[in-house]
Image: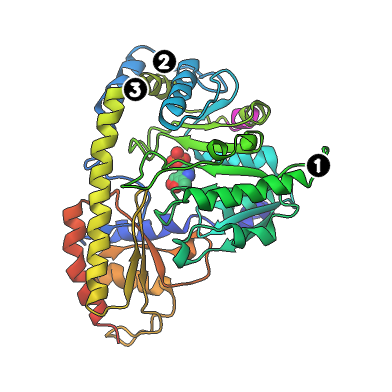
Amino acid sequence: MKVSVLAETLIGSEIIKIAGEVNQMKAKGAQIANLTIGDFDAQLYPIPAELQSNIVDAYADFQTNYPPADGVLTLRESVSDFLKSRMGLDYAAKNEILISGGSRPLIYATYLALIDAGDKVVFPAPSWNNNHYVHLLGAHGISVATQPENNFMPTAAELKPHLKGASLLALCSPLNPTGTMFSEQGLREICELVIAENKSRTAGEKPLYILYDQIYAQLTFGEHQHVDPVTLFPELRDYTVFIDGSSKCFAATGVRVGWGFGPAEIIDKMKAIVGHMGAWAPKAEQVAMAKYLKDTLAVDTYLGDFKTRIQNSLDTLYKGINALKNEGFAVDAIEPMGAIYLTLKIDYLGKSTPEGEVLKSSIDLNFYLIKEANIALVPFSAFGTNDMCWYRASVGACSADEIAAKIPQLKEALAKLK
Ligand SMILES: Cc1ncc(COP(=O)(O)O)c(C=O)c1O
């Protein structure tokens, strides 16, 4: 059947493919630790109880019509207060904040509002979905490879050669897939490049914008502090669109309430784009989230417990991998700093399984581990990198105990590779 060139050439989510395979094996009774999808097991990590009852109340209160195009005003007000009190960011409910059905429509709307076909968009690899948004826009994507020694965060030196004439720099911290974050100095140096690039452009030229995805900003661990471009350099306010929302910090991926914020003129265009897609968040969920965000005690209590448990799971996996490394296995991991992800290395490409099958790619190794160790990961190649021996482990769907129980199985499976 003939479809558009865009549809013909669109790549579906690689992660959803792997997760589909895992679910099929689970349906056949396999006990698989599903460390693939960036989601939560709702039994392990339910949404906040207050949010849940607010949602039920909102439906009982007939909050079931079209919401306003930029989101329910009380929610924009709550988001504005939330940003101010938790991050010191000053964005007006009136015209600088936009609500949508989760954060994805906001990312797409940012691209659509700022990028023309052929425009240069710079993003790090690995990163989440920028390659797909670039494809949807017909933009000229420049994927900049990052390095394990920098925790796979992009550096100013890596980005610098690519910023001349670019329209968008897409950044994310804490980063999906790595669970690592910008240091203040690291982000500062990148921001300085953006400021210098914009100073070099004429008044009529499109500037270099930053898309700053901070959806995991509330999920940071230990001494790691979230930083953002506008707090570091207020002059970047005119050039930065933030992506944020409730999906990850409140384990509310299915509730679908995201928020973006930035310069009023851009937010206004994004509002029209989201409106044409009809990608609003359901009104009842918006009303409920508005009330929940105002309940500072409930939010603090939830985040405190949630972060402790996620960090415990990440640490369990991190320590397990390090123990295998110390025993001489060709594995490694990067200290978890934020989000729900651990970056780990499993360096067995080219080795053979007991059946004599050579593991030619990270995908082969991943499927071997699914079958032999009952552990499912996502290779970094699903996040726009070349094939390499690095993987993302997402801990939202497994308890720390389940994760700990898988380490011996991983060890056994790796020991069989020759
Ligand atoms: C970095 C990042 N931004 C945005 C999103 C999208 O979130 P939502 O489920 O609210 O659309 C995700 C989801 O995985 C993500 O990892």
Return the disc, 3 or 1, that comes first in the chain's sequence.
Answer: 1
Residue 256 is situated, as x and y percent measured from the top left of the image, at: 43, 33
**Distance Cα–Cα, label 2 vs label 3:** 16 Å
The amino acid type, in three-letter code, at marker 1 is Glu
The amino acid type, in three-letter code, at marker 2 is Gln
Above or below for 155 versus 113: below
Give the SS element for disc 2: loop
Residue 53 is situated, as x and y percent measured from the top left of the image, at: 27, 21
Left or right, residue 323 beside residue 93 = left
Give the SS element for disc 1: loop
Question: On the image, which quarter does residue 351 sit in?
Answer: bottom left
- Position of the N terminus, as image quadrant, is bottom right
**Distance Cα–Cα, label 3 vs label 1:** 42 Å
Magenta residues span 272-277
Residue position for label 1: 205
Left or right, residue 247 beside residue 41 = right
Q: Residues within 10 Å of mark 2 (few under 14, many from 20)?
A: some
Between marks 1 and 2 in the image, the one whose residue lies nearer the viewer: 1
Residue 33 is situated, as x and y percent measured from the top left of the image, at: 25, 59
Left or right, residue 231 beside residue 236 = left
Disc 2, disc 3: CB below 8 Å? no
Say whether mark 1 is within 8 Å of ligand 1. Answer: no
From where the camera sits, is residue 36 visible?
yes
Return the disc, 2 or 3, that comes first in the chain's sequence.
Answer: 2
Residue position for label 2: 63
Give the SS element for disc 3: helix
What secondary structure do most residues of the magenta stretch adopt? helix
Q: Residue at x 73, y 42 (%)?
A: 207
From where the camera sits, is residue 52 visible?
no
